[in-house]
Amino acid sequence: MIACNNGNSSQGGGKADSAFNNAFTAYTQHFIDQLWKENPDWATNVGYHKYDSVLIVPDSAAQQASLAFAQQHLDSLKSYELSKLSDANQIDYQLIENYLKSVQWSIKEQKHNEWDPSTFNVSQTFAFILNENYEPLESRLRSFSARLGNVPAYYEAAKKQIKDPVPELTSLAVDQNNGGLSVFEKDFVDSLQKTSFSADEKKNMIARAQTATKAIKDYATWLKALKPAHPRSFRLGQPLYDQKFNFDIQSSYTASQIFDSAMARKAYVHKEMARISRELWPKYFGSQPIPSDSLELIGRMIDTLSVKHVKPEEFQAAIEKQLPTLIAFIKEKDLLYIDPKKPLVVRKEPAYMAGVAGASISAPGPYDKGGNTYYNVGSLEGWPKDKAESYLREYNQYILQILDIHEAIPGHYTQLVYANQSPSLIKSLMSNGAMIEGWAVYTEQMMLENGYGNNEPEMWLMWYKWNLRAVCNTILDYSVHAKNMSREEAIHLLTKEAFQQQAEAEGKWKRVSVTSVQLTSYYTGYKEIIDLREAYKKKMGKDYSLKTFNEKFLSYGSAPVKYIRQLMLK
């Protein structure tokens, strides 16, 4: 497998450049050490446990410390000349710089701590400390207990910052904070009973947990009682949206250019879907008249094909069975190297993740690269018959294969295996969501282009429906946050133009009202990878190889596509 250049190599060669790169690599380690001190929660969640006992109180002093940290490291970066760094180090430099500038922007411009009460929630890291077995239970419980001391001050600081909060985000904060209470009231207390702590020590720890619980409940009650005179809209507004897009997505395009591209893509996909549906019509509807409305025509064809699906109890087995077929196809077509030493473990979704059937990948963090990668598959056990049927129609026999490509091979799982070859912690910690999601979307198209599914028109039609999800995520997000799209218009877009089920569309509306920008990552990354592949093909001429493109692209780790592009085309 191609591994990313390590930080010690340099394009220009020579001792000076080598020393320069070594100095920069040493600096990145110093930066990470300070980053964890500044962000102990983040550290715990990626498997670095030196600061597990620390809970930072989010007051104005903490904000000033964050701003000072960002400025100090932006100044430090200035002493490294970008052009003298190796390819890998150039990307690390740009990722660190983008992160530090986004910290400054978030505090000075976005100010989400003033209008998003869900920013303040302690339960996730406490739950992580309790549930993950990285150290003996007793030492984890001591860290847990030490953190509890700052919980009341944490929520007092939160209350002082909130001004005219967004109603939807206020409800979310109430639900999420109340939802985490069992971690302190039950899980922590149950865990203490499994230890050899003295009765007095247990009693003191439980008392601390009760004080923390009261602070969380008080915060939720306080939020419920808030009646802001001028509540902020959940819509981010165009200026903030454009800036957030630049920091979060790190695209070579602007948010509005991506929106225009998604609109054009939607029109193209509709045209292709209508063409395929007309071609398939006689096979499924005989001599019945073809609907004149192309969206109605596509909708009827999709409904007809969607009845082909597995039985509820076969959902996980069907996913598992598919993986060897995907690997065999990739080998036969020589699309990219799949490392046989990194098997994917398919498992039933663990209970603590349950709630939404489907599929997801759980990969080891940057501090545990040797750990297993799991493909979590939701169970439909106990679902009402009609709900299970609707779900299985959405994930019919065609879409289920595309889901496997996207989540597993050669999508997320394969990309993560390549990314873990990178010796750079920066790329793992500051991984680019648009590149990661974009790669998964790109691989679906790449597999079909190379004959996966025997070029069946049914498979292409269903892939276009799936691709519309990524396209319409972008259209929805930008339209809602920058163009004031109404709920009715949003539901119409998703159900009538993207052919989604009503329940799925309503869930997406809820998501877009409590998040912003992330929904654009799928299409943006996909478009940038397709664009790059075309440019690379042109550059290489007769020497172009798809396998070389795929492996070279993945060798840079989870970096923004615009930086990978610069390096692949130079």
Image: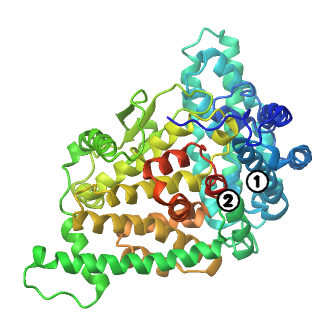
- As shown in the figure, which amino acid type bears the numbered disc 2? Gln
As helix, strand or loop, the secondary structure at mark 1 comes to helix
Residue 174 percent across, percent down from the top left: 62, 54
Quadrant of res 497: bottom left
Quarter of the image that includes the C terminus = bottom right
For mark 2, does the 10 Å Cα neighbourhood hold few (<14), some (14 to 19), or many (20 or more) residues?
Answer: many
- As shown in the figure, which amino acid type bears the numbered disc 1? Asn
Residue at the spot 85% in from the left edge and 46% down from the top edge:
66
> Camera-side residue: 214 or 336?
336
Residue 367 percent across, percent down from the top left: 62, 28
Quadrant of res 455: bottom left
Q: Which mark is residue 167?
A: none
Quick check: marks 1 and 2 in contact, CB under 8 Å? yes
Residue at the spot 61% in from the left edge and 80% down from the top edge:
484
Residue at the spot 7% in from the left edge and 80% down from the top edge:
286
**Mark 1 = which residue?**
98
- Colour mapping used in the image: rainbow
Residue 412 percent across, percent down from the top left: 46, 46
Q: Is residue 443 visible in this depiction of the protein?
A: yes
Mark before the other along the chain sequence, 1 or 2 = 1
**Mark 2 = which residue?**
250
Residue at the spot 50% in from the left edge and 26% down from the top edge:
371
> Camera-side residue: 180 or 525?
525
Q: Is residue 144 above or below residue 461?
A: above
For mark 1, does the 10 Å Cα neighbourhood hold few (<14), some (14 to 19), or many (20 or more) residues?
Answer: some
In the figure, is residue 15 to the left or right of 391? right
Quadrant of res 19: top right
